[in-house]
Image (cartoon, rainbow, N blue to C red):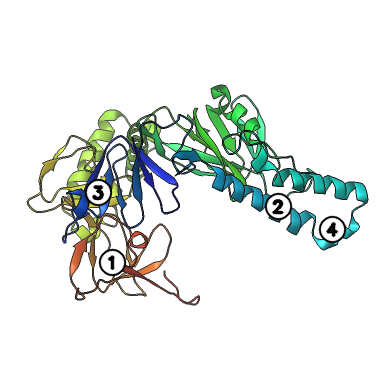
């Protein structure tokens, strides 16, 4: 087993097999000898890692409880100690700044001060717990009616009626037991619940099969596999995934999107569309949009056939790829049969991104995407961090192009420089 570690030795990925690779001048990544490599390909997760940011470690076995993104590997053993220390220190800081600041401290009686002193000492003693850092019990915060976060708490209602206070939720798609699955992370205030309490609740599939959060557009359904819990930035995160794969979920979502799109176009409700009518309408749409030039096609990418595995495509074919919500076209001379590990965003030698024309200036930057062709001297807007970057490399003249499989923020100093934008500039 190989561990992929960042510069702080945090485990970011695990793979039974890795391949040394390098990026050629045309942007295509190919296998090579280890001494010539500048990236590592993790076969199990189909992911490339630049050696400037990551390194590998081969080990015989990984404990079942070790999870990528949470554990560190140092000096021959696994540990979460660094994150436990960081969380403990954050609780101590919150205690001093919010509860035991000079104003509050002066207003406390001796008994109340003693309670807080006991709590702070319990936090300092956490590293001395027998199970540290693998099994840690954090002391309960005194005065439970006080909220250190000071923010709004939403209500999570579970399938069996259980109701919990939560801070919010985010997507957390990930590989679990060898299958890449749709995931969700629900965040909680540690003042409300302990890690063990939440683990007990969220390992009960009768509760997690359907959940709703106040103010959310739709329920959280089907996330019945518990992955892990973690402490980060003063919150407890609970990660769950679905039993079905991301691909199966995408196919179901595609069907729903297509039905809604067809219903809107022909002026009926989705439940009035028969399979025959839907197929006929879809065929007509795809036939009509096939005549549209690329720049017009980029304005309505979801009207084009969806990229699927096992389809024979020829140069000029255009396919909509759901994960990136972009339209791609097969390059000249690159006809092929699509494969699961040849997705459009990761094979720029096979597919080119079709996008609405942008000037590539600071006022009109080009939206960046993995696998697109970048032009030296033009400005790009990174979709992940929202920052502006200039594509440039020593020895390359403006106007030259290169295909890159990474976003600008991942290649700063190599191919991009971040551009500072004044507050009064309007990026729109």
Dot placed on the residue nearer the N-terminal end, 3 or 4: 4
Dot placed on the residue nearer the N-terminal end, 2 or 3: 2
Residue 92's disc is 2
| Farthest residue, direction left | 333
| Observer-nearest of 404 and 358 | 404
Dot placed on the residue nearer the N-terminal end, 4 or 2: 2
Location of residue 201 with respect to 352 vertically, above or below:
above
Dot placed on the residue nearer the N-terminal end, 2 or 1: 2
Q: Residues within 10 Å of mark 4 (few under 14, many from 20)?
A: few
Q: Mark 3 and mark 2 in contact (Cβ < 8 Å)?
A: no
Location of residue 62 with respect to 293 vertically, above or below:
above
Which residue is painted at 35% across and 32% down in the image? 60
Q: Which numbered disc, 2 or 3, marks the residue closer to the eye?
A: 2
Residue 415's disc is 1
Q: Which numbered disc, 1 or 3, marks the residue closer to the eye?
A: 1
Left or right of 187 in this view: 366: left
Q: Which residue is mark 3?
A: 346
């Amino acid at each position: 087993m190989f561990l992929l570690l960042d510069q702080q030795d945090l485990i970011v990925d695990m793979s039974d097999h890795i391949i040394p690779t390098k990026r050629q001048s045309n942007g295509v990544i190919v296998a090579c000898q280890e001494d010539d490599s500048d990236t590592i390909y993790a076969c199990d997760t189909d992911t490339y890692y630049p050696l400037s940011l990551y390194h590998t470690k081969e080990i015989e076995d990984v404990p079942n409880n070790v999870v990528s993104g949470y554990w560190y590997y140092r000096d021959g053993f696994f540990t979460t100690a660094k994150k436990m220390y960081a969380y403990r220190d954050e609780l101590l800081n919150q205690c001093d700044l919010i509860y035991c600041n000079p104003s509050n401290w002066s207003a406390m009686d001796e008994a109340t001060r003693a309670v807080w002193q006991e709590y702070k000492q319990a936090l300092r003693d956490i590293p001395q717990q027998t199970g540290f850092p693998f099994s840690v019990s954090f002391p309960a915060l005194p005065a439970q009616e006080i909220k250190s976060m000071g923010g709004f708490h939403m209500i999570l209602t579970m399938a069996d009626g259980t109701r919990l206070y939560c801070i919010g939720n985010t997507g957390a798609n990930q590989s679990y037991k060898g299958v890449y699955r749709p995931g969700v992370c629900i965040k909680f205030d540690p003042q409300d619940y302990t890690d063990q309490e939440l683990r007990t609740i969220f390992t009960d599939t009768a509760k997690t099969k359907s959940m709703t959060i106040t103010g959310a557009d739709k329920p959280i359904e089907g996330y019945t596999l518990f992955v892990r819990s973690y402490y980060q930035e003063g919150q407890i995160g609970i990660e769950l995934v679905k039993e079905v794969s991301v691909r199966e979920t995408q196919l179901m979502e595609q069907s729903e999107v297509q039905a809604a799109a067809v219903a809107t176009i022909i002026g009926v409700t989705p439940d009035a569309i028969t399979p025959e009518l839907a197929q006929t309408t879809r065929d007509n749409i795809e036939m009509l949009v096939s005549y549209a030039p690329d720049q017009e096609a980029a304005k309505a990418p979801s009207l084009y056939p969806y990229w699927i595995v096992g389809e024979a495509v020829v140069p000029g074919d255009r396919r909509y790829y759901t994960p990136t919500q972009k339209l791609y076209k097969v390059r000249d001379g690159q006809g092929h049969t699509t494969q699961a590990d040849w997705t459009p965003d990761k094979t720029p030698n096979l597919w080119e991104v079709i996008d609405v024309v942008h000037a590539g200036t600071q006022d009109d930057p080009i939206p960046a995407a993995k696998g697109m062709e970048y032009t030296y001297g033009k400005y790009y807007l990174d979709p992940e961090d929202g920052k502006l970057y200039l594509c440039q490399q020593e020895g390359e003249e403006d106007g030259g192009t290169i295909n890159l499989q990474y976003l600008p923020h991942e290649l700063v100093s190599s191919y991009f420089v971040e551009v500072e934008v004044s507050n009064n500039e309007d990026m729109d």
